[in-house]
Image (cartoon, grey):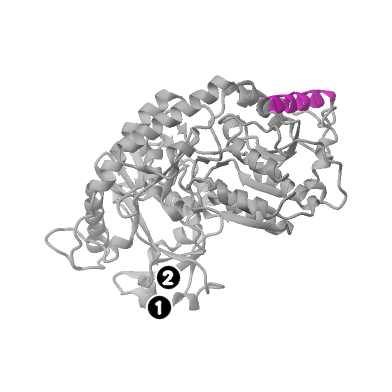
Amino acid sequence: MPYDAVSLNGRSADDAGLVFKQADQAWEFAEISQLNYASFVEEVPQHPSNDDRALVDRFHPENTYFICRRDQELVGMICVRDRRPFSLDEKLGRLERHLPQAEGARVCEVRLLAVRPGMRRTRVLPGLLTMMARYCQEGGYDYVVMSGRVSQQRLYRHIGFIPFGPLVGDDDAPYQPMYRPVGNVGVEFAGRFHDAVAPPPGQPVILTPGPVAMPDAVTRAFRQPPLSHRSPEFGRLMQSVRRRLRALTGASYCAVMVGSGTLANDVVAAQLSRLNAPGVIVTAGEFGERLIDHASRMGLRYTPVRHEWGAPLDYDRIAQALAARPHGWLWTVHCETSTGALADLPRLKSLCQRQNARIALDCISSIAATAVDLRDVWLASGASGKALAAYPGLGLVFCAQRPPPDTTLPRYLDLGLYCAGDDSGTVPFTLSSNLLAALDAGLNRQTGALRSQIDADGRWVRRQLRSLGLSLVAAEAESMGAVTTIALPADTVNAAQLGRALEAQGFYTSYASGYLRERNWLQICLMGEVNRSQLERLIPVLAAQLDEMTRAQPPAQSPE
């Protein structure tokens, strides 16, 4: 559930038609100033009155507002701010002196919680709190601080706020400083108020790199009664999955293990460590950098060949690095998920063959999204989610030769143990038959025609995006159809805000990962059940949101 832009499943007439979202339109900011006046001038005498009957908060440009509205009427609001000094800093001095283990912590301040009197026994407050909680958790904050009205202490304590320090304000409007560790507050609040907010009606369009929209056949297969991983039925199912994966990729062997693609890459790193030879790691994005982290943790010797994120690979530099380490290895990402750039696999194979070097690939995002030929590839990693359109939870490692077990490796990282049962369908450790059955069903839909359609749809989407004046991270010649990364102008469009606005319209894109937020990037991914008609509906919605965000300006700040 997103923490803004959701509609309400009401329990009463008062709940009907409520929409929760992050404020981003001029009229919403005007309504905020009027509700601010009604709450903190007329109801609680905290500020002097004025003829405009509007109060613009002195921190307004720095506030992130979450609101609840019904049609064009604002019925509730709350805001979060993380720029110091906070209002509480000014009243109490440096807050870290009052909070446990707060030195170096990330702190934000919650302010301006207001709900119109007639809506205070509805789901407005729980919905606002849920959005605030999600925002604080996803933002990586450690503590939330606030000034809680003394009359509402029972409520604030109920949701985990702890009082500290003396009262602030005055006799007419006394407030108690309070704090709350963020912890798992997003999940906690969503669980406590899970019936408060719900996604918009209709099936959402999932345009993320994972989890993906799964075919009905996949979800039905997952719901079948579980099988023992030692049963003959399980063995036949595992053989079917391995056979289909080998046919899809051209690999000689395929190991299936419990874990994500990260585990599969750890297994690859463990096999590279057995070579006792230096290698080359090529990076051009987040997931290439993660390969370096895998290698460093495994103690591998390597030379990094780094590129700008999204830039075409410099194959001459790669060739030079390999020539300096003949008989070594090369490890890189086939499709760099963070940018959508696709490496030239035949060219990489050729470079390695010239230097008698082994090649290892991260193919987690490319398998089933584009043609992947793993013949002559020593090792490659994959995962059950993404374009295979199954549930996440199974890591895949493809190999050209069956490695023997190696007792010097941790059991979960020993590829030889997984491959020992390749002929019989046995597995060395417990593995969910439900996940395996779902993957088998996902493999049923894999065809060359489907991959061609993904590529065509991706190129169509990118043409539309360019026509809107948007900048794409990867050049068209290097792009894979299933992943498109948009570099948004930070001075006019906030990627997270745009992503949440699209969620309000039923389109779930990717924007929340730290590396995307840091760069103000948003991704549209065509993995799973996505069709052209859904994309044709997305483009005008995206254009309208961009138009609103670039035109909408908050009201001019007035003195308090």
Tag 2 near tag 1, CB within 8 Å: yes
- What residue do we see at 64% from left, 31% from top? 373
Residue at image point 26% right, 66% down: 58
Q: Main secondary structure of the magenta part?
A: helix
Q: Is residue 24 magenta?
A: no
Left or right position of 166 against 547:
right
Give percent across and percent down for residue 8: 40, 38
Residues in magenta?
232-247
The crowd level at tag 1 (other Cα within 10 Å; few <14, some 14-19, many 20+) is: some
Residue for badge 2: 177
Residue 167 drawn at (x, y percent): 39, 75
Q: Is residue 453 left or right of residue 17?
A: right
How far, Cα to Cα, is label 2 from label 1? 9 Å
For label 2, count other residues whose C-alpha is less than 10 Å away and answer few (under 14), some (14-19) or many (20+): many
Percent position of residue 72, x then y: 24, 41
Q: Is residue 531 left or right of residue 245?
A: left
To which quarter of the image does residue 532 belong? top left
**Disc 2 marks which amino acid?**
Pro
Q: Secondary structure at mark 2?
A: strand
Where does label 1 land, which residue? Answer: 92
Q: Confirm whether residue 20 shows in the render.
A: yes
SS at circle 1: helix
